[in-house]
Every structure is written in structure tokens, then in C-alpha cells.
Image (cartoon, rainbow, N blue to C red):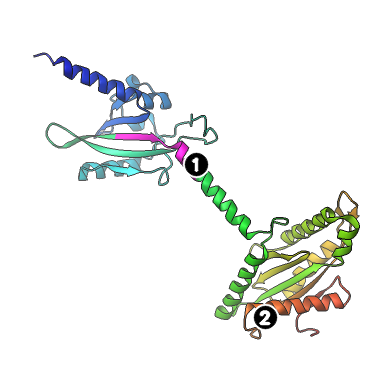
Amino acid sequence: MSQPQSDLSAFHWLIDMLESVEVGVVVLDLDYRVQAWNGFMASHSGVPTAMIHNQVLFDFFPDLPQKWLKRKVESVVLLNTRTFTSWEQRPYLFRFRNTRPITGTEPFMYQNLTISPVIGPDGNVNKICLMIYDVTDIASSRMALEQANKELGRLSMTDGLTGLLNRGTWENHIDAEFERHRRYGHESALVMFDIDHFKPVNDTYGHLAGDEVIKHTAQIIRDNLRSSDRAGRYGGEEFGIILPETNAEGARVICERIRETIENATVQTDAAPIQYTISMGIAPLTNLPDNYMQWLQQADQALYAAKTGGRNQVRVFGDDQ
């Protein structure tokens, strides 16, 4: 008995839709042999349907996450329910080149994946269907937004001129270091320092040259600190450094290295070459301060002693006070 014309029309309509839809459709039997491979898959993979039909998927795509995919498929077959994986969990199943003109900077196509059971005439699952969705635009936009938020977060914590921590963020680190000392008793030192005679630099050479001196100072700090140390711009030409796990003598060695490097350097500016010095005060953390603000005041007092003692020197709180 011939098939009704309406059924044939519906069948051809379904085939045309599968070939033209912008979704990858792959039907596999339980031995992972390809039973359906639509136009989306043929176009993006470069493998025509006739070539891959009835072939084991992994033979054509050995870089597929075989263990992971088999585990997913076995769960779908066993539970007779579909499963979904987003690009955030796994960026892609098939590594297809990204062909989106708007998001052309992405190296590959980000994909969402749905795995669905296909029920046979006997009521059992005898095939599974993979549906691959190109979500590169969504993924790219999400990652760009996250990167922008991350950058905004970074900018909110750093000083715009030097890239060091800004005053508020740096003081939060002082508070955290003070609390860490109170809990564990670890050594720590706090350093405050500023640029000697900075106002005449601005008055003589201009604020742009002054900015170059400040940026140069920040770079010298970065070059001479450990990854665990925290440096910040406290304001104007004043800076601060937190030195965890460091006693007074260790802090003095670090500070003298910074001071000598700056003393021996020349900053090349458009106005003129500029040489300058800094004065530094160190406050080793003891049980005397009741809070981080008192610790900060100790470092500031040591800095004041360095300034009144002739500048271009390092002083430790308690040595002269």
C-alpha cells in the first residue's frame, strides 16, 4: 500500500527544515554510529552527510571528549530523559571554527548541547539525538561584560596615575594585616614614605613632570617588592607599603634598596631630567597599637623623624622616638 501524499509532504518538509535550521542535529544509534547529520553539521565540520552516515562518530572526530559524552549518553538512555549542557560548563562539544562576523574575535564556536532519547517502536530507547546550538554571540557578550566588570573592579581599587592600590583599598589591607597579626602573631612591618621637596618639582617643571616622578617612584616600588607585599599611593606624593612576614631589619633592607635606587636614578621628562630623593618611616608591628590606625600613626611618626632628620633616609619607629 502506497504512503499517503500528505505523509510524504510532511516527511519532505521535516527533512528540509532539518537541513536549513541553524542548529546542529546528530542522531546516533547506541553504538554511536551516525544515523542523521544535518546541513549545519556538514557545513561547520566539513564532513558531508553521505561520508559519515552509519560511521562511528569518534572515528571521524577523535578529539571529542569520548568518556564524557558516553557517560552523558548512558545516563540519557538509562533514565529516558534529556540532559542539557551549557557553554559555561563545557565551551563546546565539536571544535568548530567561529564564523560569526560580529564575534569574529572568538577562536571557536561556543555551544550549548541537548542530548535527547529517541524511542523506538518497541518503546525502548534505541537512538539518541544531539542538538548543538551556536551561542557564540551570547558567550562573547557575557565574557566581555564579565571582563568589563572585572576591570571596573580593578580600577575602583587602584590609583589611576600609578596603578598601585588607592588609599581606601590599601588601608583595608592594613586592617586585614593587623587582624592577621593579632590572631597568629606573625611579624609584619608598615612603611610610609614620601618624595622630598616635591612641591618645588611641580613649581619648577610643571605638574606633568611631577606626574612622571610619581609614576617613576611607583615603578621602583613594584620592581623591589615581593608578590606578598602590598603597595599603595596614600595621596599626592605619599606612598605606603605593607611587608608581611618581615621584621624591622628586613624592612630596613628593602627600604634602603628602594631609597638608593631612587637616589641614583634620573627621570627623563619633557621639561628636564629630574633627580630626587625620598624619606621613609618603618613601623614594625608589635602588641602596642590597639588598631591599624595607631599602627599607621607609628609609621607616620617614623617618616616625620626621617624628614626632620635631614631627609633621604630611613627611620624605624622606636629607634629615635
* Spot occupied by residue 203 in the image (x, y as percentages of width and height): 89, 60
Give the residue displayed 57% in from the left and 77% down from the top. Answer: 179
* Spot occupied by residue 248 in the image (x, y as percentages of width and height): 72, 77
In the picture, measured across the screen, residue 75 lies left or right of residue 107, that is left
Give the residue displayed 32% in from the left and 43% down from the top. Answer: 84
Visible in this render: residue 248? no
Give the residue displayed 66% in from the left and 78% down from the top. Answer: 293
Residue 141: numbered disc: 1
Give the Cα separation between the discs numbered 1 and 2.
Answer: 47 Å
Vertical order, 59 against 319 (above or below): above
Residue 294: numbered disc: 2
In the picture, measured across the screen, residue 52 lies left or right of residue 146, that is left
> Magenta part of the protein: which range?
130-142
Three-letter amino acid code at disc 1? Answer: Ser
Give the residue displayed 61% in from the left and 69% down from the top. Answer: 172
Dot 2 surroundings within 10 Å: few (below 14), some, or many (20 or more)? Answer: few
Q: Identify the mark nearer the N-term, 1 or 2.
A: 1
The answer to whether residue 285 is magenta is: no
Visible in this render: residue 88? yes
Q: Are marks 1 and 2 in contact (CB under 8 Å)?
A: no
